Image (tube, rainbow, N blue to C red):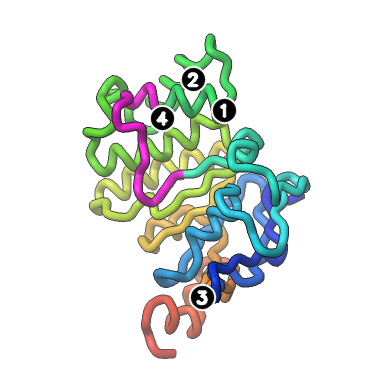
Amino acid sequence: MSILSLQAVSKSFGALKVTDDVSFDLQPGEALGIIGPNGAGKSTLFNLITGNIAPDKGRVFLDGRDVTREPPMVRVKSGIGRSFQIPQPFGHLSVYENLLVAARFGGEVRASDAPGFCMEILSRTGLLPVAESPSGGLSLLQRKRLELARAMATRPRVILLDEIAGGLTEAECGELITTIKAIHAEGTAIIWIEHVLHALNSVVERLMVLNFGRMLMIGEPEVVMASPEVREIYLGIEA
């Protein structure tokens, strides 16, 4: 059974159709990449999966259960974690306290278990040295790591990554990829929106292309990127 399934999901804002009849299945432990030009509807698709916005039509299933009308917190507790393109930590709290909030309220980790649970995630994401630092003063790489760590603290079975490699140097991107690969290797399913293609293709097994809200193609990354239509629309190379 698919861990996540979208069936003919559509969303419009006025006359603008930002998600147009999108359907796909995500298997347990699979990594799926999503690419497309700016304005293709990628982040809107994440908002539909997490429940931040409701579809006009279509349905969203998690483990075969219809969650289309369930609120975001219910979906978090059901196993959907998310990072945001623009990191949104609680700036007045420390890095550790940010994780503690996510673990207790999103992951429903018991109070007695939460400190050790959070410290383990800090170690795995390379944030242990700044655990007591205010999150508002972190570097970009550290903020990106914190976004990933907070998603992990909710104990997800599916993590949605929204351009988490954007703005990083080549070396920083490499460090983050290593962390993401380790998380994926443990069996966590991933959906990753990204413009840094070499980072994306080093992790994902399948690649989806969105254009004007519609799914143009989905398949193995090498096959998708070799498509003349994808190259013309996404890369700006005339077919």
> For the residue carrying disc 2, how many other residues have a C-alpha within 10 Å: few (<14), some (14-19), or many (20+)?
some
Q: Is residue 16 above or below residue 33?
A: below
Q: Which residue is mark 1?
A: 107
Mark 3 or 2 closer to N-term?
2
Q: Which residue is mark 3?
A: 212
Q: Which mark is residue 124?
A: 4
Across and down, in percent, residue 28 comes to: 66, 46
In the picture, measured across the screen, residue 195 lies left or right of residue 109, that is: left
Q: Which mark is residue 78?
A: none
At x 52%, y 74%, the residue is 16
Amino acid under disc 3: Phe
Q: Secondary structure at mark 4?
A: helix
Distance Cα–Cα, label 4 vs label 3? 37 Å
Q: Is residue 13 above or below residue 234?
A: above
Marks 4 and 3 close (CB-CB < 8 Å)? no
Nearer to the camera, 102 or 227? 102
Magenta region includes residue 88? yes
Mark 4 or 3 closer to N-term?
4
> For the residue carrying disc 4, how many other residues have a C-alpha within 10 Å: few (<14), some (14-19), or many (20+)?
some
At x 57%, y 76%, the residue is 216
Across and down, in percent, residue 153 comes to: 49, 30
Tell us which disc is closer to us: 4 or 3. 3
Amino acid under disc 1: Gly
Mark 1 or 4 closer to N-term?
1
Marks 1 and 4 close (CB-CB < 8 Å)? no
At x 59%, y 72%, the residue is 215
Mark 2 or 1 closer to N-term?
1
Q: Is residue 8 above or below residue 100?
A: below
In the picture, measured across the screen, residue 171 lies left or right of residue 98, that is: left
Q: Secondary structure at mark 2?
A: helix
